[in-house]
Amino acid sequence: MNQPLFLQPVFQERIWGGTALKDQFNYEIPSNHTGECWAISGHPNGQSTVVNGEFAGKTIGELWNDHRELFGQHPSPVFPLLTKILDANADLSVQVHPNDAYAKDHENGELGKTECWYIIDCDEDAEMIFGHTAQTKEEFVSMIEKGEWNDLLRRIPVKPGDFFYVPSGTIHALCKGTLVLETQQSSDTTYRVYDYDRTDAEGNTRELHIDKSIEVTTIPHKAEAVEPVVETREGVESTKFVEAEYFTVYKWKVDGHSSFVQDQPFQLASVLDGNGVLKVHGEEYSLTKGAHFILPADIETFEIEGQVELIVSHV
C-alpha cells in the first residue's frame, strides 16, 4: 500500500468531560460533556475508521483481522494499543486496572490495562492522584472502609509536558483541569475505587468495584520512574519517554525537515501542535493539530517537514 492510514476518531461522553477537545483541537464533539477522544482504536467499544486510500471506511479491527501484513504480521489476536485524548473537566474517579492474567480470568478475555499519560495542557494548580499510602492490604482495606481518602491517596502536581507511566495495579485519577494524551493497552476495563459520591442527572451514583480493586492493587504503591532520553538530529528532537513491556512512547518535535527510517512493524502517531507535511514514497500528506495516523509495515522510510509536535508509539 505504501500509504499512511489517517483515522477518524470516536468520541465518548463522560460525567467528567467538557469541551476542550473542541476548543483545542476543533473536533466535532457530541456534547459539552465529552471526555474521551479514542483517536487510534481497534477496541470493539469504539473503533477508529480509516479516512484515506484504498482502505477508507475500514475500521482498525477489520484491517487487523483481514490485512495483518499492514502490521508486520504482529501475533497479537487484537490490535494491541489504544491512543486517547482525555479532557478532565472534572475529577475522574479514583481507579485501578487489572493485569493481563486477571482480566483474562475475570473480564471475558479482555486485555489488562497498563497505560501512560502525556500532559498536553492543564490548569496552573492542576494535580493528579498517583498511588496510595497503605503499606499492607489490611491497611488498604481498613482505610477504604473508613473512607480515609485524604490520608490514603497520594496527590502530585502536574504541568504541561509531564509524562507518567501507569502500570496495571496503580491507583490513579486525573483531576480537574487536565488535557492528556494517553497511550494504553487496548482495554476498556476500569475498577472504580472512589467517585466522590457523585450522582448523575437521575441522582444515581456510579458503580464501584471495591473487591476487584483490592485484589488487583499493587501494595505498597510502587512508583515507576520516568527518565526521558532526548536525541537531537537534523530537524528533529526525539524524546523517548518510556520503553516498556507493552509500548514505547516518544515525542517528536520537528523543526524544518527530518528523515526517518521505520524500524518497527508499525507506528501510531498523533499531532499535538503545529503544522507540517508527511512525505511517503513521493506523496505528501498534511499534518495538522489533532490528526492521528498509523505508519504501516510497508512504509520503510518517510520524511516530515514543518513545525510540528507528535506523540509516537509502537509495541
Image (tube, helix red, strand yellow):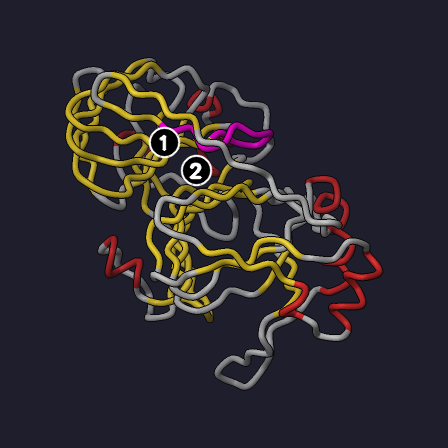
Query: Closer to us: mark 1 or mark 2?
Result: 1
Quadrant of image for the N terminus: top left
Queried whether the magenta region covers residue 68, the answer comes back as: no
Figure check: 205 above or below 70: below
Q: With 277 as the anchor, is 204 left or right in this view?
A: right
Residue occupying image coordinates x 74% and y 57% = 134
Secondary structure that dominates the magenta span: strand
Queried whether the magenta region covers residue 246, the answer comes back as: yes
Residue occupying image coordinates x 41% and y 45% = 162
**Depth check: 292 or 283 in front?**
292
Query: Pointer 1: what residue?
Result: 294
**Depth check: 215 or 291 in front?**
215
Tell me the number on the disc at residue 60.
Answer: 2
Give amino acid for label 2.
Answer: Ile
* Res 287 quadrant in image: top left
Residue 112 place in picture, x, y as percent: 64, 43
The magenta segment is 239-248
